[in-house]
Amino acid sequence: MSQAFYQRQPFMMLDRPQLMLNAITGPSYTKSVTSAAYYTPPEDALDQPGVSGSAVTATMMTAAALGAAG
């Protein structure tokens, strides 16, 4: 993450706040059970499990440590 942040510095406007955008989405699944509102294993097909809460926190803290504004 830090490598990508610093590699892009020559192309950024350094007089403005820097943002880091990361994927922190939840699970991606194909819904098979229409009577349930949420993911229902094993009936629904899980495509990608999503990102854990600790990974989201680590990403946010790393961005702040690198000096990103948000």
Image: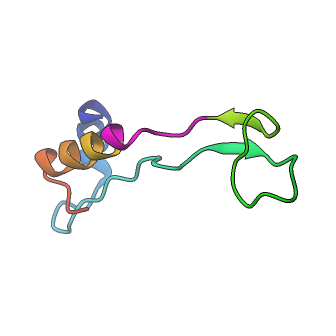
Q: Residue 23's x, y, as percent? A: 47, 46
Q: Residue furthest front?
A: 35
Q: Residue furthest bottom?
A: 16
Choose between 8 and 50: the one closer to the eye.
Answer: 50
Name the image colouring.
Answer: rainbow
Q: Residue 17's x, y, as percent? A: 20, 66
Residue at 20 percent of width and 62 percent of height: 69
Count of numbered circles on the image: 0
Q: Residue 42's x, y, as percent? A: 77, 32
Q: Quadrant of residue 53?
A: top left
Question: Is 2 situated above or below 26?
Answer: above
Judge from the rendering whether residue 32 lies leftward or rightward of residue 46; answer left or right: right
Residue at 16 percent of width and 51 percent of height: 64
Q: Quadrant of residue 37?
A: bottom right
Residue at 78 percent of width and 57 percent of height: 36
Choose between 22 and 15: the one closer to the eye.
Answer: 22
Judge from the rendering whether residue 43 lies leftward or rightward of residue 24; answer left or right: right
Q: Where's the N terminus, which quadrant?
A: top left
Residue 26 belongs to magenta span: no
Question: Is 45 situated above or below 67?
Answer: above
Choose between 51 and 37: the one closer to the eye.
Answer: 37
Choose between 12 and 57: the one closer to the eye.
Answer: 57
Q: Where's the C terminus, which quadrant?
A: bottom left
- The magenta region covers 49-55
Residue at 34 percent of width and 37 percent of height: 55
Q: Quadrant of residue 6?
A: top left
Judge from the rendering whether residue 11 lies leftward or rightward of residue 27; answer left or right: left
